[in-house]
Amino acid sequence: MPREPIDSHVARGPSTRRGANFHGVAMSIDVLLVECTRCNRRAALGRDDAPIRQGNMDRVAGAKFKCRKCGPVGVRSYIPISQDEVDMFLAGDPLPEARRVV
């Protein structure tokens, strides 16, 4: 059976097992997608909004985010591999579960 080509530097599967970090976000497309667990508000965070840079091994699951409406609550975060996925997410469409961080 032929192997599928790898289309991302982000490993597949739940990030709590693989320990996704901000270095992995930087190696993807420098965008972290977050969604408030309380009000479902969505946002795309770039280098100016989150500590996304090469060499930053801080885990995404350990980062604290603050919703504009709800304050500091839990978020669901995703690491996209293309601008199309960012646009889909911001439009309200679900992303593949393999992109989910926490």
Image: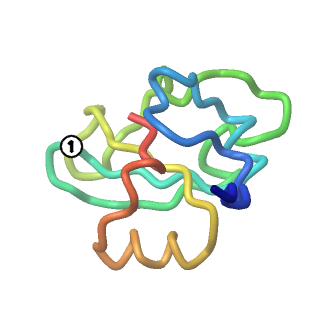
71 vs 59, left or right, is left
52 vs 20, left or right, is right
The quarter of the displayed image where residue 80 is located: bottom right
Q: Quadrant of the C terminus?
A: top left
Asked whether residue 29 is in view, the answer is: no
Residue 99 on image: x %, y %: 48, 50
Q: Quadrant of the N terminus?
A: bottom right
Taking 93 as reference, is 19 above or below it? above
Q: Residue furthest left?
A: 38
Asked whether residue 87 is in view, the answer is: yes
Determine the residue positioned at 79% across, 40% down: 53
The quarter of the displayed image where residue 8 is located: bottom right
Camera-side residue: 6 or 96?
6
Residue 54 on image: x %, y %: 84, 37
Q: Which residue is mark 1?
A: 37
Camera-side residue: 89 or 71?
89
The quarter of the displayed image where residue 42 is located: bottom left
Taking 1 as reference, is 15 above or below it? above
91 vs 83, left or right, is left
